[in-house]
Image: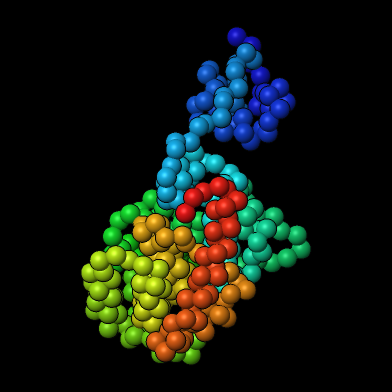
Amino acid sequence: MAYKSVAEMAELWGISERTVRNYCAEGRIDGAELIGKTWKIPADAVRPGRRKLKQAETLLQILREQKRSNLHGGIYHKLQIELTYNSNHIEGSRLTHDQTRYIFETNTIGLENEAVNADDIVETVNHFHCIDYVIENAEKPLTEAFIKELHKILKTGTADSRKDWFAVGKYKKFANEVGGEVTVSPDEVPLKMKKLLSQYSDLKAVTLEDIIDFHYRFESIHPFQDGNGRVGRLIMLKECLRHDIVPFIISDDLKMFYYRGLKNWEQERGWLTDTVLTAQDRFKAYLDYFQIEY
């Protein structure tokens, strides 16, 4: 039997070599063989057709379908890049939007005459995994175990994780502040978290305001030594998907309004609510573009 290389089949079919390799790895080309690191493809192989996604009714179902089918350029792709870039940027990451996108799309990073903090890269990749974890577990009740696992995924492999005193996937050991505000002491965190989750689980029907209120109380407790903001925003994504509420991304330009809203939530809920609604309107524009109902 005659065989062709990946490059030859890519030219024949008018597609990228990467796509041909993906077809081979997914077993979609009959007779394709991997010899060492090189694919041998039957010369008479037929190009695989496009995969048809199942008809999905909710955003969560669509995200799962696009994630599992490795669809690029859809709402899953958009969510991963926009949420990861903005949430990390709020916390001080210096990776650009293009660098974040490039890491997601190619699992590599292109640098030219610049230094990048290794943790920015590690936490970016970890955040992609966190979003996947949220999507796959969105329908499950919100628990301490789920929240701790998000923190573990986010911080594993970082410089913090190599510190003896830093608890990855566990509550903080030392007192900390957020924006100059005092948070709950380490010895009180377990009880406060159990109480918060119990009150939240008792809600009959969860609304957007309930999710925002949970976020405020979670950030006030500040249960982890670091990573609370990103974990908190991932929780909001999960709960929006769970309750079929349009999610939202706090972008860098909304950061100061977001912080102001958190600080004044007890006195004036409208500030943070308006910020979230602005962010939600932007996400609705994404859904409109991808023709996804909400």
Give me the residue at 42% from left, 66% from top.
236
Residue 258 locus on image (x, y percent): 52, 78
Location of residue 189 with respect to 129 vertically, above or below: below
In the figure, is residue 259 to the left or right of 222? Answer: right
Residue 43 locus on image (x, y percent): 64, 15
Instruction: Tell which of 254 and 133 is nearer to you.
Output: 254
Residue 152 seen in the current view: no
Residue 89 locus on image (x, y percent): 59, 70
In the figure, is residue 83 to the left or right of 196? Answer: right
Instruction: Tell which of 282 and 102 is nearer to you.
Output: 282
Instruction: Tell which of 242 and 1 is nearer to you.
Output: 242
The quadrant in which residue 140 appears is bottom left
The quadrant in which residue 192 appears is bottom left
Q: How many marks?
A: 0
The quadrant in which residue 138 appears is bottom left
Location of residue 60 with respect to 39 vertically, above or below: below
Residue 196 locus on image (x, y percent): 28, 75
What colour scheme does the image use?
rainbow
Residue 10 seen in the current view: yes
Give me the residue at 53% from left, 56% from top.
79
In the figure, is residue 130 to the left or right of 40? Answer: left
Q: Residue furthest right?
A: 113
In the figure, is residue 179 to the left or right of 98? Answer: left
Location of residue 266 with respect to 254 vertically, above or below: below
Give me the residue at 60% from left, 9% from top.
1
Give me the residue at 68% from left, 33% from top.
16
Location of residue 254 with respect to 150 vertically, above or below: below
